[in-house]
Image (cartoon, grey):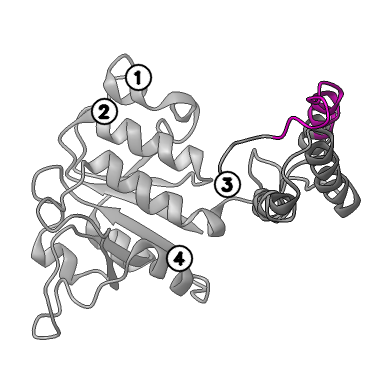
Amino acid sequence: MIAVAVVGAETPGNVGTIARAMKNFGLSELYLVDPPELDPEGDAYGFAGHAREDVLPNATETTLDVLTEQFHTVGTTAVTNEDARSHVRYPFRTPVELRESLRDVETDTCVVFGRERVGLLNDELAAMDEVVSIPASEEYPVLNLGQAATVVLYELRELTVDSYQQPDAIERADESDVEGLNEQFGALLDAINHPEGKRDKARRLLRRVVGRAHPTPREARTLRGILRRAGEYAVPPGKQSTDED
């Protein structure tokens, strides 16, 4: 189980945003350390979306000591140390690296986010089992608290979400349909009396384009129909295209 904790948040709206991101990516256990007042009529619930129904009202107020006792804790930071001479903010993982490392962690984990202005303090980070940092521009690496949580939880989704709203894969047209599309294009080149010396090249170009595109069955059928209709309006024999390659 992966839980989320927010330490010392100052803005109720950010707590609501984090609760919503948790709902988006399959998490439900929210812990709050020194939270602001979360008015059911205020920004926290307003920003929480459907998480106002369960994640946010069921949040548990606790202390950092309790979290470190009960969970494998992951502290988040925007600013990191450069090398091993300091062990507070180094070594650190990116969110993707964290996801892969947590696959092998059998105990419950809590990802801990800090304050809007200063994040987690050094002594708080020192109590964490590991640290995660989002790669960002060196000139401005600090993300909004709600944004940072959304990015990290998105990258952890493979561990927390059983199924997505999208289909597993986009259906590709059968190879016979794709080949039929290529043949239909070739027939059109013949019908419009495209210069013979350029037809093979044009066929290869379309084959490569279609090969990269992986059209769906409907797309292949539609394109074949258009090419077929276009062939019906072919230019009279002898009037070749003068277009360049």
Residue 223's quadrant in the figure?
top right
**Mark closest to the chain's N terminus, 4 or 2:** 2
Residue 188 lies left or right of residue 80; in this view the side is: right
Q: Residue at (45%, 65%) from the top-left corner?
A: 99
Residue 184's quadrant in the figure?
top right
Q: Label 3: which residue?
A: 245
Dot 4 alpha-carbon crowd within 10 angstroms: few under 14, some 14 to 19, many 20 or more: some
> For the view shown, which residue lies furthest in the right direction?
176
Dot 1 alpha-carbon crowd within 10 angstroms: few under 14, some 14 to 19, many 20 or more: some
Q: Secondary structure at mark 2?
A: helix
Disc 4 or disc 3, which is closer to the eye? 3
Question: Where's residue 195, x and y in %?
Answer: 72, 44
Marks 1/2: CA distance?
8 Å
Task: Answer whether labels 1 and 3 touch (C-beta < 8 Å).
Answer: no
Q: Label 1: which residue?
A: 46
Q: Label 2: which residue?
A: 13
As drawn, the label of residue 99 is: 4
Marks 1/3: CA distance?
57 Å
Residue 125 lies left or right of residue 50; in this view the side is: left
